[in-house]
Image: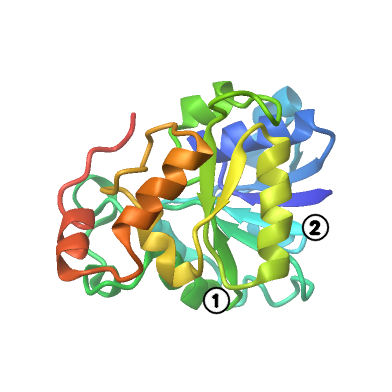
Amino acid sequence: MNIGMIGVGMIGGVLTRKLVGLGHQVFVANSRGPGSLGDFARETGAHPVSVREAAKAGEVVVITIPQKAVPNLPEDLMAETPEGTVIIDTGNYYPVQRDGRIAELEQGLTESEWVQKHVKRPVIKVFNSIYFVSLRDRGTPAGTPNRVALPISGDDARAKSVVMALVDSLGFDPVDNGTLKDSWRQQPGTSIYCEDLPAAEVKRRLGEMGTVQTPQHRASAHAKRDLPW
């Protein structure tokens, strides 16, 4: 596939390397422009482009930037993105350490619902619940005992199926975590965040959390969070 990657930090960098290694064409962009990505492109085999170009580069676009940077994306970022393109959001909200307080998130809107409002396209939430080192090193073939599983949330069944296949190809078991509104269950502060659990345990813990984000859940999730590095 052709894949646009907006952001090449720890998660974006790992995903780029792994996806290129699987034979995908990856078009990478950051806030500093393609000229800043020459060394990274030569190292990985990715193609440096502008943010707007990455947003229309292929069948999948990955947004993997800090929450505080999302409002800085062009308002018409997805204006030329073909209908049917799968948009992935990998972000997490760290109000104390990095992002500052974002009112809608403090009031209970999930992180990816907020991103979806900004980019004006449906998004799928994945790759936010795993430490970048584990994403880099812990992928294994399908059927491996205790294979690490990744929860996936979203409202579009077709887009979710594309993402599930991609997650499997990267070496992880995909677990359906329901709608985008349910994605709070894979955000920081929950029992599956950065725990590298197999699918059965991920499903068990998701079930324990229920389907309604209570005020207690919101308080826990939006309290002081340790960045996972």
Which numbered dot is residue 58?
2
Residue in the foreground of this view, choosing between 226 and 26: 226
Q: Give how far apart the Cα atoms at labels 2 and 1 are.
A: 20 Å
Please give the name of the residue rendered at 70% of the width and 31% of the height, measured from the top-left corner: 142
Q: Which residue is the site of mark 1?
A: 75
Marks 2 and 1, the one that precedes in the sequence = 2
For the residue labelled by badge 2, is the local secondary structure a helix, a strand or a loop?
Answer: loop
Mark 2 is surrounded, within 10 Å at the Cα level, by few (under 14), some (14 to 19) or many (20 or more) other residues, namely: many
Give residue 43's position: percent from left, percent from top: 71, 23
Give residue 157's position: percent from left, percent from top: 67, 69
Please give the name of the residue rendered at 57% of the width and 40% of the height, measured from the top-left corner: 12
Kind of residue sitting beneath label 2: Gly
Please give the name of the residue rendered at 37% of the width and 33% of the height, measured from the top-left corner: 195
178 to the left or right of 92: right
Look at the image and name its color scheme: rainbow
Q: Quadrant of residue 85?
A: bottom right
- Seen in the picture, residue 89 relative to 15 is either above or below; the reply is below
Give residue 22's position: percent from left, percent from top: 80, 32
Please give the name of the residue rendered at 39% of the width and 53% of the height, measured from the top-left corner: 206
